[in-house]
Amino acid sequence: MSATHRRIALGAALAAFALLAPVLAPNDYVVGVLARICLYATLALGLNVVVGFAGLLDIGYVAFFGIGSYLYAFLASPQFDIHLPFLLALPLVVLGTALFGIAIGAPTLRLGGDYLAIVTLGFGEITYLLLLNLDRPVNITNGPSGIIGIDPPALLGYTLGSNIHYYYLFLLVLVLTLIASNRLRHSRVGWAWQAIREDELAARTMGINTTVAKLQAFAIGASFAGFAGALLASWQRSVFPENFLFTESINVLAMVIIGGMGSLAGVVLGAAVIVALPEIFRDLADYRMLVFGLMLMLLMIFRPQGILVPRAAPRPTPNSPTATEKSA
Amino acid sequence: MLGILPQQLVFGLALGAVYGLIALGYTMVYGVLLMINFAHGELFTIGAYVGWGVLAWLINTQLGGLHPAWVLPLLLLMAMSASGLLGMALERFAYRPLYLRGATRLGPLISAVGASIFLQNAIMLTQGARMKVYMTNLLFPRSWTVQVGGVRISALVLVMISVAMLLMWGLHLLVQRTTLGRCMRAVAEDREVAAVMGVNVRRVISLTFLLGSALGGAAGVLVGLYYTQIDFFMGYSAGLKAFTAAVLGGIGNIRGAMLGGLLLGVIESLAVTFLNPAYRDVVAFVVLILVLVFRPTGLLGESVPHANKV
């Protein structure tokens, strides 16, 4: 069996598993976890565009997830008494979040590396605090009590109700996101991103408009998050500021990294690990987050490049600590 | 509203001095390893808990015959030892295997996040999720105040500012005057060249963690005494603020961390006075973003040569 055949067989097995999983799942709770894996994998693929492709470290990414969720909640809930149909609200949300991505990305273009990270962290915190406090003087976000009673999505006159429905919807979205990510990676802008990631100065010398390419990364990354946010809001039927804490940003970043940065399969695997681990350790009750933290450390110690190492493993940069100092 | 402004400014300075202390830990580690030690906030929490435990024990035993003036130094010493040693252990077991193997810069970041989650939950499981109360009143009664130009300043606030300043001054001397300090600066400048020049890089990194974490532990005691309530989650927002302070002043820059801390504390107290207190943190982050956008390396500039790669 050749390598190609093996890949096809593996792909078919995975597809069959993904399609049958909710049927084989022992209970509705597990189906819910599977749906969440698909949803977070979509979100993580968006962050992968920014961090994995373009090399822009964003540690406030969940802000876009939150903005998407709230935009959807504004457009389809009793909050402002607007009830747009799902398929009309979705593109509006995605467009709106992409605009936020550009707005937040624009002032950060001059910043590199960790400074960019801190500014994104700042934007993430500001977004959370605004969601929490914009119930006064004018009630926009309804403050800490969140927005409830969000309309469930209706597709072709059929209203989604159970976890299984959502699982298949999220799986479909995930597959589309994977295809989009793959197309993006091998597109003109995808190559530009990777050039910027490797060496920004060299990229600019080669005639790449780094400003435009970076803004595209922010806008596209944000629009994935907006999409996922709208799905979250329609699934939970409610949104709260607590869904979009800094720790969530870090969780999503961990999904991108532990699977193997830059590899699409790695991102999906990372999302599955990060969502499922605390569930698997649920029997440990209070100890589950303790074990989760320990697992993150151990994973990084024993698989520093991620679980699935991408074929072109990232070379250590001149700035990164290298093995040469073993002589020290 | 202007009447309470001087009072608020003093609170801001006290809080800012503590942010500066915590920020030093971030900035020192960043200086030598180019990594954000996300677990630093938890080391600060552990300092607060150790201080609380020692204080409670001392009070139970009628101070064990100790003169009250020695209580604060003892609290600080115990908290600093515990946080410092734990910081060193963290470096040894969670970060060193990664930087020795030449992982990308994101690996240690995630390992640090894991350490942070682990420590936070370890504290919650061993100490309980409910908050602990510092018996500050027995150490610094509320009636001890000093009147300066119409502003009533509590003795505790003065002690906080002086302890923080003293520790920062000590660190400054250590970094500028001693051999260890010179080695630390050399490692921050260029690790490989420092190694070639005979600096034991691993030992310097380890000691940097010890010092930075110890300062965080001291800050934990001060914050505990000031707010009188501590809980396992306190390191989250304090760490975030302190890191903001470090970046505000210019990361890797020790004086910058102090300046950034004080500035952040004062900005927050101004925001509380003139704006809605709920937007205190929003103001802090907006200032951070504005500073970085217009002066991308912080107020005093970074002292890390090149840090623009993921």
Image (cartoon, helix red, strand yellow):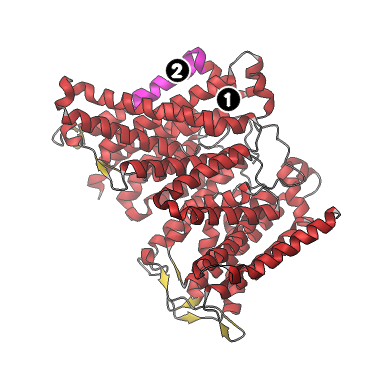
Q: Which of A236 and A53 is in front in this view?
A: A236
Residue B159 appears in the rendering = yes
Name which residue type carries label 2: Leu
Q: Tell me residue A291's x, y (percent).
A: 48, 45
Callout 2: few (<14), some (14-19), or many (20+) C-alpha neighbours within 10 Å? some
Q: Tell me residue B112's x, y (percent).
A: 52, 39
Q: Which of marks 1 and 2 is nearer the N terminus?
A: 2
Residue position for label 1: B188
Q: Tell me residue A269's x, y (percent).
A: 64, 54
Residue position for label 2: B174
Q: Nearer the viewer, residue A75 or A3?
A: A3
Residue A218 appears in the rendering = no
The answer as to whether the residues below labels 1 and 2 share one chain is yes
Q: Tell me residue A97's x, y (percent).
A: 58, 64
Q: In which quarter of the image is residue A299?
A: top right
Q: What stretch is highlighted in magenta?
A: B164-181
For this orientation, the residue located farthest to the bottom is A157
Residue B149 falls left or right of residue A280: left
